[in-house]
Image (spheres, grey):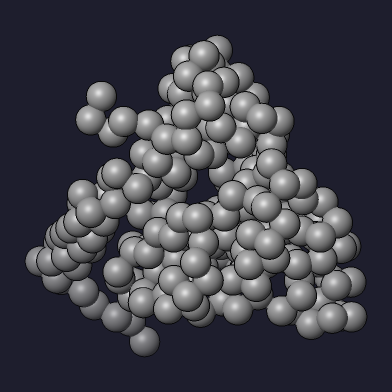
Amino acid sequence: MSIKTSIPDLLTLISRRFEQSISVSEAFFTREAEQIARACWAVARRFHQGGRLLAFGNGACATDAQHVAVEFVHPVIVGKRALPALALTNDSAALSTLAAGDGTRQLFIRQIEALARPQDVALGFSLDGRCENIVAALEAAKHRGLLTLGLAGCEADLFRQAELAFCFVVPARDPLVIQETHETLYHILWELVHIFFEHEGLLASEADGINIDA
């Protein structure tokens, strides 16, 4: 059995896909620009104080955790400094052991308890915003003094209720669009953190924030 699709149908599908990707992303970054700048500043301060980035997520989001971690450890732009980052999803032996013994809710909590330090940054991903184990790990990180960032999609009530330092929710239900927006967001995070490191005197100051309008 063959499925026939006309060229006009394909062009319509492509057009709709681009339109959705662009419109959702544009609305998100317009709304969240100031908070994103503040989050980047806070992450840069943690790195400057000797902190590390600990990233984690389930399923497809595990690859986002690995993606952002490797970009900090091995910058793709020549001349940018390497910064310590770790994807908690990389250790399959530890993850499978923890899942078998404690269930998935405790999956990343145990790693946070064993590895995290108060100056670190915890970055959790969830495409549908309903990953209880990601929220639980972020809450555990918050109680240990880590800077917490949640990247989620859909309505993400669990993430909002956790009262994280920064919570970025992409108001969409298409997981592809959500993932695309998350990827752009952590690329901006990477870029702005390195821009702040070009002004280390500012990072070393006692200032708690930045003047967005400056």
Whether residue 86 is visible to the viewer of this picture, yes or no, is yes
Q: Please say if 33 is above or below 83.
A: below
Is residue 125 left or right of 51 when viewed as pictured? Answer: left
Whether residue 187 is visible to the viewer of this picture, yes or no, is no
Q: Which residue is drawn at 89% across and 80% down?
A: 101
Of the pair 68 and 146, the residue shown nearer to us: 146
Q: Where is residue 68 in the image (x, y as percent from the top left)?
A: 57, 44
Q: Residue at x 37, y 64 (%)?
A: 169
| Image quadrant containing the C terminus | top left
Q: Which residue is drawn at 50% across and 39% down?
A: 42
Is residue 135 left or right of 32 when viewed as pictured? Answer: right
Of the pair 208 and 62, the residue shown nearer to us: 208
Is residue 109 left or right of 123 when viewed as pictured? Answer: right
Q: Residue furthest front?
A: 206
Q: Where is residue 15 in the image (x, y as percent from the top left)?
A: 15, 60
| Image quadrant containing the N terminus | bottom left
Q: Which residue is drawn at 49% across and 67% down?
A: 163
Q: Position of residue 139 (x, y in %)?
A: 63, 67
* Image label count: 0
Q: Which residue lies furthest to the left in this view?
A: 8
| Residue 155 found in image quarter | bottom left
Q: Position of residue 18 (x, y in %)?
A: 21, 57
Q: Please say if 10 is above or below 44.
A: below
Is residue 175 left or right of 105 when viewed as pictured? Answer: left
| Residue 195 found in image quarter | top left
